Amino acid sequence: MISLDISRRELLLNSGLAVATAAAIAGGLAGIDPAWALTTKAIDPETARGLLGMSRVLYPHAILSDAYYGKVVEALDAGAAADPAFATMLRDGVAKLGAPYGIAFHELSPGNRLEAVKAVEGSEFFEAVRGTTAWTLYSNPQVWPLFGYQGPSVEYGGYLERGFDDIAWLPKE
Amino acid sequence: MAKFELNNSNVVVIIGSGAGGGTLANELASKGIDVVVLEAGKRYTIADFKNDDLYMFNLISWLDPMSQSGDIAKHRPTPLWTCKTVGGTTVHWAGNCPRFQPHEFKTRSTYGDIPGASLIDWPLSYEDILPYYEKAEAKMGIAGRGGRPHLPGNNNFKVMAAGAKRVGYKRVHSGYMAINSVPYDNRPACRQIGFCMQACAIGAKWSTLYTEIPKAEATLRCEVRPESTVLKISHDDSGRVTGVVYADAAGTMHEQKARIVAVAGNAVATPMLLLQSESGKYPNGLANSMDQVGRYYMRHTTGSVFGIMPGPVYWNRGTQMAGLIEDESGHAPSRGFAGGYHLETIPLGFAVFGAVMMPGAWGEEYARDIEKYTHFAGMWICGEDLPQAKNRITRDTTKKDKFGLAIPHVHYDDHVNDKRMRNHAFAQGRAIYESLGAEKVYEATPFASGHNMGSCRMSERPEDGVCNKWGQTHEIPNLFISDGSQFSTSAAPNPTLTIVALTIRQADYIADQMAKRAI
């Protein structure tokens, strides 16, 4: 078991006050420990840090803490555990991102990170990480309140009496 | 529920339990005809349904392996979005039920000879089907027909309607929906839940799962066998079909004898069953001596327009597709294409929205737009696509399914007419949202197709199609096509109402022919 610790300071910097407020209202962050740690089974720490950084370059949301992006790395790790070829592709892919700079991807400046990801756009590695990021990030019910998505409604009797037609800004004519 | 012996050769075997198969079962059983329904999928109840896009997608979708090529080559995980469950795709559908327009039954005569297309007139007219449209609408309880009120419009509809008015459209309303606007047929009125395509969790939307099928069973003339995958249709030396070979849930093979076989497996499985039933007498598969089985596969000209509006919309709230613009549905060649299209409201649940609103999109700007989820409005284009001989379902012999049979291969390319129509619809949809001050408009490419049609089409002449105007195959009198595979052309409207109307009409014909001992 390899453990990758994200400091409380880093978590707070990435999550920001907005998410804390939104989470307090929505309860969206309940259950996420400030001492959150990313653990991977089949992916080494360097690759894991790279994938974490890449997932945020792909779908950057200041309102989401690294904990949510960590779920993406966990999903990729599960794929790597099941398929050694996939694990190799991820490791090589992350290594290649930083190679032109002579610096590990997760240590690159924000501008260089974006440039590095753009350079591999369309590759199998890119698509695997992009697709996994999009599905993992947005299908997590914990993030839904942060984007204003209300999720299931039948439990509350639908929207018949809860605003299905409450739009107020349309022109009157 | 009735139980029939495998060697009972007096039963009508129906393959599939969706809009075609489920309806045919009830129509025949109600006339006193014994029916066995073989459904590949599992049987669920309303209590099994959750307001969860991905959970429901995995629970009810048809995800059997198939390969694909042409303009749909990149669709993942499947080029089609249909269902494998009792009730078929009526569990998932949105419920839109516009009627075909009279000219859409005469496309070859109306549009002329369009290069690259294989247009034919239907072997029946609007006048022929009209009484059956009325029966289908009464059966399904269509809101906006038969004196039943339209559904109330939700926020997403109000945005589309306000913009439509500004661009000059007149025929705008909340649609002809198979979703109860008032309690009907022992089913409740819609609660504006917003997960219609994830299976209606209260049964306000018509589905054969909880209407036609239990009604058929209550006659004691119908047995439904879920998890029964038909592999082959058998025939005798005279060429008439005699039964079907199927695998049950445990994989055990059975042969159910039959007087008549009706195939209603949707537009991929239906032609596949005919093709994989090849024999010494029928080396190209059943009803295929003219090489027509599997051709002219259609899926409508589709696409979506998404607007980021100046105020909140909450498009996730309420009936998903209760919104219809009919103004572009006619045939007006001055627009640069033949046929017409509808615009219908569509929302996306957040998981699907984030992942595939614009397939492949990423980066800072896209992420900012995703954060505007509550301000999105959406509409879906549903227009006529033209039949092309090269768009077809074939057997991919390079890959085998779990029964050792070749998997389906689906080839589909847009006709240039389809491209011109989509282009026009994108511009119109954009104008609608921009007229209300949209800050940005996305023109999104088609999703996996829910409307699949034409792959065993009806035709006046045997050389133009697979079946006649009753869905009876030209070559084998006791073999019927009973789903959207029958469609001669796609027309603009959503297909289900026409499938149900054709099925009620077909049941009358089958009963009449059986009484006359003709089949």
Image (tube, coloured by chain):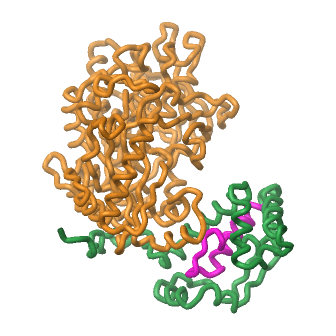
Q: Residue at x 42, y 50 (%)?
A: B92
Q: Quadrant of the C terminus of chain B?
A: top left
Q: Is residue B2 visible?
A: no
Residue A117: image location, x then y, percent: 71, 66
Q: Residue at x 69, y 66 (%)?
A: A75
- In the picture provided, is B113 more to the left or to the right than B151? right
Q: Is residue B381 visible?
A: yes
Q: Nearer the viewer, residue B202 or B422?
A: B422
Residue A16 drawn above or below residue A113: below
Q: Quadrant of the N terminus of chain B?
A: top left
Magenta region: which residues?
A: A55-81
Residue B468: image location, x then y, percent: 35, 19
Residue B108 drawn above or below residue B101: above
Q: Nearer the viewer, residue B424 or A35?
A: B424
In the rendered image, residue B118 lying in the magenta stretch gets the answer no
Total numbered labels: 0
Q: Nearer the viewer, residue A62 or A113?
A: A113
Q: Residue at x 55, y 91 (%)?
A: A17
Residue B484: image location, x then y, percent: 39, 34
- In the picture provided, is B513 more to the left or to the right than B138? right
Q: Give the colour in which the image draws chain A.
A: green
In the rendered image, residue A59 lying in the magenta stretch gets the answer yes
Residue B52 drawn above or below residue A32: above
Q: Residue at x 19, y 71 (%)?
A: A172
Residue B389: image location, x then y, percent: 49, 25
Residue B269 drawn above or below residue A130: above
Q: Give the colour in which the image draws chain B.
A: orange
Residue furthest to the right: A102
- In the picture provided, is B243 more to the left or to the right than B382? right
